[in-house]
């Protein structure tokens, strides 16, 4: 996506967040091939200026047009089960971020050390599935947390509700994806493209 599409994506996500918490109509969805094509997307809300996570929900697979994925993700992020529901008063104190995903690709079975060597922090988002449990981290998460690859995989296992080393289980299915990240610099402020790295 170019920066103009990124700005439109974030502004639409912000519109959907504010519509959800105020129980009003969401603004007009952005149009064009970039938004009508099926894409995976996540909407993240962070406190401003503190930068603490306030909600993050999305669709890893391209199951609906991007505009719809952004709207649904933004609405759902207001009710992220890890936090209290977002209140209308909080919208002045959050920044909204949209991550548009590539299609997740399975990492073929190989020894755990080889898997770890193939993962690049800042480029690869990861998804882990094992025993009916699933966890996902966007590419920016290990950068923001200062994790190395082993920590990234360990905390991914825990995000899935599994033991820290569960990613090493031969039955574990790992997938990787990349993301284009667009974020407000301040509440309702400028939108910039940012690298996970």
Image (cartoon, rainbow, N blue to C red):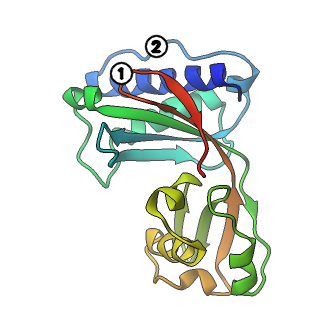
| Relative image position of residue 105 (x, y in whole percent) | 76, 59
**Element type at mark 1:** helix
Q: What separation in Å lies between label 1 and label 2 (alpha carbons)? A: 8 Å
At horizontal 68% and vertical 38% (from top left) the residue drawn is 39
Q: Of all residues shown, which one is farthest toward the left?
A: 89
Please, which residue is most extreme toward the top here?
Answer: 28
Q: Write the residue at 47% across / 21% down.
A: 190
Q: Is residue 163 above or below residue 183?
A: below
Pointer 2: what residue? 27
User: Which corner quadrant of the image does residue 82 belong to?
Assistant: bottom left
> Residue 156: horizontal and vertical position, in percent?
51, 70
Give the camera-side residue of 135 and 54.
Answer: 54
Of residue 149 and residue 82, the one placed in the foreground of this image is 149
Left or right? Give the position of 91 relative to 63: left
Residue drawn at 67 percent across, 70 percent down: 174
Question: Do the CB atoms of the residues marked 1 and 2 lie less than 8 Å apart?
Answer: yes
Q: Nearer the viewer, residue 39 or 10?
A: 10
Q: What crowding class fits label 1: few (fewer than 14 Cα within 10 Å), some (14-19), or many (20 or more)?
A: some
Query: Which residue does the numbered mark 1 point to in the structure image?
Result: 19
């Amino acid at each position: 996506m170019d920066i103009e599409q990124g700005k439109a994506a974030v502004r639409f996500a912000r519109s959907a967040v504010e519509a959800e918490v105020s129980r009003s109509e969401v603004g007009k969805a952005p149009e064009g091939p970039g938004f009508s094509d099926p894409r995976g997307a996540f909407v993240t809300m962070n406190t401003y200026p503190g930068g603490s996570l306030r909600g993050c929900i999305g669709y890893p697979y391209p199951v609906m047009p991007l505009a719809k994925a952004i709207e649904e993700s933004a609405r759902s992020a207001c009710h992220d089960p890890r936090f209290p529901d977002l209140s209308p008063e909080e919208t002045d104190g959050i920044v909204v971020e949209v991550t548009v995903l590539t299609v997740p690709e399975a990492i073929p079975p190989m020894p755990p050390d080889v898997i770890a060597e193939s993962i690049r922090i800042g480029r690869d988002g990861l998804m882990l599935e094992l025993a009916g449990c699933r966890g996902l981290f966007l590419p920016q998460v290990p950068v923001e947390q200062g994790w190395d690859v082993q920590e990234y995989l360990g905390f991914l296992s825990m995000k899935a509700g599994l033991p820290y080393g569960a990613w090493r289980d031969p039955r574990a299915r790992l997938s990787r994806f990349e993301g284009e990240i667009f974020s407000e610099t301040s509440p309702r402020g400028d939108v910039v493209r940012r690298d996970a790295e």
